[in-house]
Amino acid sequence: MLEILLVQLSKPSVWLWLAIALVISYAVHRFGRLLLRALRGQIDPRMLKALRWLWLLVVVVGYVAYATYKIYLPNIPVLFALGQNIAEGFRNTAGQAVVIVALALIAWRMVGTFSERIVPGNDEFNRRNVRVQTLKGVVESTLKVIIIIISLIAGLQALGVNATSLLAGVSVLGLAVGFGAQSLIKDVFTGFFILLEDQYGVGDVITVNSGLLSGNVERLNLRVTALRALDGTVHIVPNGQINTVSVSSKDWSRVVATVDVTYQANINEALRVLKAVSDEIYTDGEWRRYFLEEPEIQGVTQLAPDGVTLRALFKVLPKSQYAIGREFNRRIKIAMDQAGIEIPFPQRSLNFGGAPIEIRLTRDDGGESGPTDQDRTRSPIKPSETRDPEDED
């Protein structure tokens, strides 16, 4: 018996069949565990645990019996006969169907498990992570579709259906359906070029078709783009219907920091305050890491009906412009109050006849500035990093 065992184990084909049988046994074991999991809550937990161990024992004994038959050890009659019956059973339609379903479930789970391990989640926002997470979702969905197609073809072959002739008929039907599915084909081609050119990806903030829809990209595949709006609404947009895309979070972003002052204000002093606040945020340790360049003070950019507009530009990391913009608004308001520079309110002049009548909308405090003893370097709350609502539509 030992001599027969050594001779059989020296054959590479025997090891190959044993390896295939091991994979099939594992797949059948996982398939059984999946079925037992469906009984959770229906039977006693101790009984469920006993069934799991019993199923494991059945799979192990079945593998050992098949190995005994494949190695050809007739001196162990019980295991040899059982292994022969198992081999014949898996040649039948029912056995092949079980193996196909089990292997398909294992492949389905392996796709998700391996993608999580190979591409672990990373909360840091940068172009590499955006592209990796996007391609990860597309590859996962594509592989799962391939698993379903291969499993269906193998299952039909196991049931005795000629898959070759069936595929020929399906191709003719697909040609007929293709004329009515041009929009679907357009969606897929557009999605392919979106991924190929890295136009945007999962995690980007985009505006579609000149402001009709905007939001954070939650999901992107070859067919659709899913946007999460600020109010939580999810917009599903077919890729073929996307004509223009405005990406607010690619490579870098910019804060357009503006403040209005009255015509009576000292403009030079207001510009000094604007520069001081801009430099203050830039040198602050909490905010410095978001800046890519020093602030650019553009100066007076508009003489509006109600006041004079001053503007500065901050080049910052993508998706950080919202929080920095809110912090700038807080600090510039306090700084203007401390400098005694008034932020304007609406003013209108009406003419009745020849003499103008000036109507001013005043405040109860007589136009005085707000409190000047506030600490503008320390915010009582950290500004939110979510995008502004006016970017929604």
Image (tube, rainbow, N blue to C red):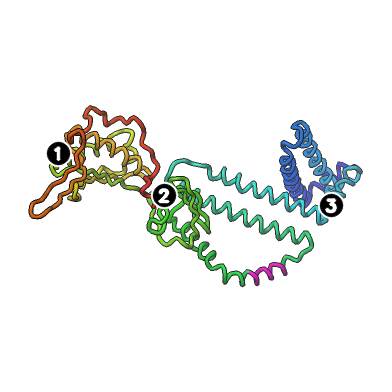
Residue 177: where, in percent of width, then height?
A: 61, 69
Q: CA distance from mark 2 to mark 3?
A: 56 Å
Q: Amino acid at mark 3?
A: Gly
**Mark found first going from the N terminus, 2 or 3:** 3
Q: Is residue 179 above or below residue 280?
A: below
Determine which residue is flagged by label 1: 269
Determine which residue is flagged by label 3: 89
Residue 254: where, in percent of width, then height?
A: 31, 47
Q: Is residue 178 left or right of residue 65?
A: left
Q: Is residue 299 visible?
A: no
Q: CA distance from mark 3 to mark 1?
A: 91 Å
Q: Residue furthest front?
A: 353
Residue 196: where, in percent of width, then height?
A: 47, 58
Determine which residue is flagged by label 2: 205
Magenta span: chief secondary structure: helix
**Tag 3's secondary structure?**
helix
Of badges 2 and 3, nearer the viewer stands 2
**Mark found first going from the N terminus, 3 or 1:** 3
